[in-house]
Amino acid sequence: MGLVVGLDVGGSAVKAWVAERGGAVVAAVNEALGTQRPTLHTAEFTPAAWWDACRRALAAAVTRADRPAEDYDGLTVSSLRQGFVLLGKRGELGKGVLNGDRRGARMLGALRQRYGSAAIYARTGHWLAPELTLPKLMTVASAELSRWQRTERILFVHDWLLWRLSGALINELSHASSGQLTDVRARTWASDLLTDTGIGTAKLCRLVEAGAVVGRLRTGLVTGLPEGLPVVAGGGDTHLAALGVGGLEPGVATVVAGSSTPVQLAVEAVPADPLRHPWVSAHVAPGLWAAETNAGYAGTALNWFARLFGLTSANALAVQAWRGESGARGVTAVVAAPEWSEEAWASRAPNTLLGFTPAHEVVDVARALVEAHAYGIRANLDDLERASGARLRSVRLVGGAARSSAFAQLVADVCGRTVEVPVARDAAALGGAALVDRALGGSGKPVDCVCDAFNPRADSRLEDGYGRFRAAHRVLLANLPEGGG
């Protein structure tokens, strides 16, 4: 069986992987990536440093796989969304901009006043947020005029890596539509909107669907890979993870429980949600869209509290949580987001612990934190089901937290739904291998998703805890709101 090699690029690390077409992952190597934050609301990276890290990771994964060059059939990439690199005549212009960068905040008022939130959402599938690519590009065009004038191409991080690997200049659709730059239903550039906002389309590239063969691997880039290896357009990180675990099937929600917690559902038409909650983007298969919400940064909060308690990792704090009682003995942690909407993103409830007394211990706080994560997942699953009008028949849980069977059982108990955890890890790699298989004429089906199933158990203490969590969030948001994002 032929091999596929790929990169999965996040905000702090890149994973290079080798997998069989439609089969298992053979090798995977992680390499750290550096991030710079020159101001409070900016998040950038040095393209040369990231490229060097990606090349090292690819070389290490190929070495670890220890297979002959002729076994390789293709290469692809998945990456964070909303981040981008600007190219000039001689290459990258300055730092790359990351997905968490919020420089676009200054443009939201003008966009809202000129077009209205409802019209922007209907056209692009996204409500206004400073992290999206559209307002960030508008800010660069306004505040960095010289850099903007020298820009010849706008590349999402995924597109930039494909350019580095093959020389191809393309924009992949799942990334472009996740950046508020496309007409989400037509799966084309929102040309009039882009022209009207000063971005235009001249600096953009040919728009391609995930799975398109865009070029060939440059000679001599990675030892052990064949000259002329087909390079295939990949997709957004969550999109490919969903593909890898069967999340493109009807009614299958994919929950990626990591630092943040995207909750995604493949749909056959763009949902007409009157509340305008889910972000909607083109999926990595023709005729499908991804409707997506996010349960917030509970994973990040767990890491933060672990450091406060002098523990080595979030896993160490989670171990404490499983020693605690269901319901956390009345302690409530507001560290997850029960609602994904423009209003909730613009003004959020502060991270808070409630009900903590001298009678409580670390295990109670730890338990409250992991339960809050599960409560946020429940609220978002329920809302995604409402917005899409599709009954969820399966929940696939992946990401770092999914490695804990105790957490998977907690999510099942809180949500009242069967939760399935794929046995095979590296979901994005499995999705990437399936995508390349499709591009090269294969079935494009990922390896059969064998899962451990966790059936829900009734627990009144968790139901009470969920009620406290929702009530606390409402009160805090109404009376002590913080700036969003």
Image (spheres, rainbow, N blue to C red):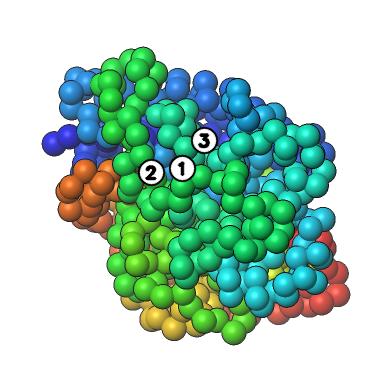
The answer to which of 241 and 44 lies nearer the viewer is 44
Disc on the earlier residue, 1 or 3: 3
The residue labelled by disc 2 is 233
Disc on the earlier residue, 3 or 2: 3
Marks 1 and 3 in Cβ contact (< 8 Å): no
At horizontal 57% and vertical 62% (from top left) the residue drawn is: 190
Identity of the amino acid at label 2? Ala
Q: Give SS at disc 1.
A: strand
The residue labelled by disc 3 is 160
Disc on the earlier residue, 2 or 1: 1
* Spatial separation of the CA atoms under disc 3 and disc 2: 11 Å
* Spatial separation of the CA atoms under disc 2 and disc 1: 9 Å
The residue labelled by disc 1 is 170
Note whether residue 399 is visible.
no
Viewer-nearest of discs 1 and 3 = 1
Marks 2 and 1 in Cβ contact (< 8 Å): yes
Point out residue 167 in the picture as x, y percentages from the top left corner: 44, 29
Quadrant of image for the C terminus: bottom right
The answer to which of 271 and 401 lies nearer the viewer is 271
The answer to which of 379 and 334 lies nearer the viewer is 379
Crowdedness near tag 3: few (<14), some (14–19) or many (≥20) residues, C-alpha within 10 Å: many
